[in-house]
């Protein structure tokens, strides 16, 4: 099972997350591309740290929304969204080469992730952008989402993702962040949930029902309080139970 985290999101003197600490724990890093967060020098520094540790690098493009951290929905026209996505992925690829690494997948950020996951025009734009840029880059997206199935049909390689620190609705969607209990904080509870997911392919929804999820990667949000403790606990739990941690070599 892969363990990923959003990184490279600091901007100038404003700091977000503990990238260095998380890079000692996770196996994949979703690195901001400058639209929702991150500045070139900071992104490059995070890329260099990831390369030094042998961590898989993913592009984490979002809406052009620095003030809202990419978490505000935007009704972007498809040509604008496609161009913006290709622009961001290309910029991160250039910085990754400078750091001695390469981009291995693409995971949309924030509100773009949530909107595109449902398919529709923005989902189509994400797929079109990846196919236009290079069909070899897998799309990392919410396990069970319409976009994941749509990407497979389009011939894109995919990585199905589950969220460690987010609560789930019975239909497999994430509980919206504006609702109570949407973000989980107890490292022991989270680690137990993720171990069950890795072993049984199920996760408990907030109403107690079980959701079947076929996931290859687990995300811990870098901006969540206690993110390092959560990721550390998941890694320790997996190690203790003999669950291999790392990206699928395929």
Image (cartoon, rainbow, N blue to C red):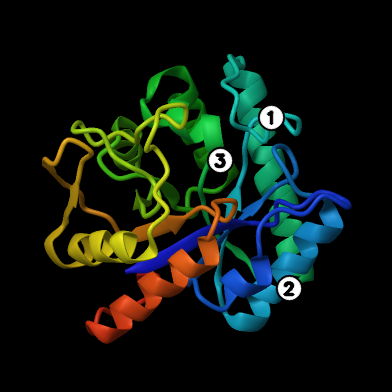
Q: Nearer the viewer, residue 136 or 63?
A: 63
- Callout 2–callout 3 Cβ contact below 8 Å: no
Q: Where, quadrant-wise, is the N terminus in this rendering?
A: bottom left
At 20% from the left edge and 49% from the top edge, which residue is drawn? 213
Q: Which residue is mark 2?
A: 48
The answer to which quarter of the image holds residue 87 is: top right
Residue drawn at the location 65% of the way across and 30% of the way down: 63
Residue 196 in picture, x, y percent from top left: 18, 63
What is the x, y in percent for residue 23?
A: 59, 73
Mark toward the start of the polypeptide (1 vs 2): 2
Circles 1 and 2: CB distance less than 8 Å? Answer: no
Q: Name the secondary structure under disc 1.
A: loop
Is 236 placed left or right of 4 in the picture?
left
Relative vertical location of residue 192 with respect to residue 79 in this rendering, above or below: below
Which label sits in the foreground, 1 or 2? 1
Element at badge 3?
A: loop
Residue 68 is tagged as 1
Q: Position of residue 48 (x, y in %)?
A: 73, 73
Residue at 59%, 31% in the rendered image: 71
Question: Does residue 9 appear to the left or right of 127 in the view shown?
Answer: right
Q: Residue at left 61%, top 17%? A: 76
Can residue 228 be seen in the rendering of this structure? Answer: yes
| The quarter of the displayed image where residue 19 is located | bottom right
Q: Considering only order in the chain, which callout, 1 or 3, is on the residue closer to the N terminus?
A: 1
Image: 177 above or below 247? above
Residue 37 percent coordinates (x, y): 72, 43
Dot label at residue 109: 3
Query: Is residue 81 left or right of 181 when viewed as pictured?
Result: right
Q: Between marks 2 and 3, how big is the CA–CA gap?
A: 21 Å
In the figure, 105 relative to 206: above or below?
Answer: below
Query: Mark 2: which secondary structure?
Result: helix
**How far apart in space, not on screen, are marks 1 and 2 (Cα)?**
27 Å
């Amino acid at each position: 099972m892969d363990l990923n985290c959003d990184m490279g999101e600091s901007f100038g003197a404003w700091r977000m997350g503990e990238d260095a600490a998380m890079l000692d724990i996770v196996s994949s890093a979703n690195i901001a591309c400058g639209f929702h967060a991150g500045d070139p020098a900071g992104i490059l520094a995070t890329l260099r740290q990831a390369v030094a540790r042998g961590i898989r690098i993913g592009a984490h493009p979002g809406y052009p929304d620095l003030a809202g951290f990419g978490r505000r929905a935007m009704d972007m026209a498809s040509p604008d969204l496609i161009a913006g996505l290709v622009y961001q992925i290309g910029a991160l690829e250039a910085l990754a080469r400078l750091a001695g690494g390469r981009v291995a997948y693409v995971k949309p950020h924030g509100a773009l992730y949530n909107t595109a996951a449902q398919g529709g025009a923005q989902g189509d734009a994400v797929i079109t952008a990846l196919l236009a840029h290079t069909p070899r880059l897998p799309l990392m997206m919410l396990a069970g989402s319409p976009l994941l199935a749509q990407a497979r049909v389009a011939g894109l390689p995919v990585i199905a993702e589950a969220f460690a620190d987010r609560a789930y609705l019975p239909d497999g969607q994430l509980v919206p962040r504006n609702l109570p209990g949407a973000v989980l904080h107890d490292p022991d509870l989270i680690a137990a949930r993720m171990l069950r997911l890795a072993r049984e392919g199920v996760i408990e929804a907030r109403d107690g029902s079980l959701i079947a999820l076929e996931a290859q990667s687990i995300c811990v949000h870098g901006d969540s309080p206690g993110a390092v403790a959560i990721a550390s606990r998941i890694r320790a739990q997996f190690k203790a139970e003999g669950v291999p941690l790392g990206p699928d070599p395929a």
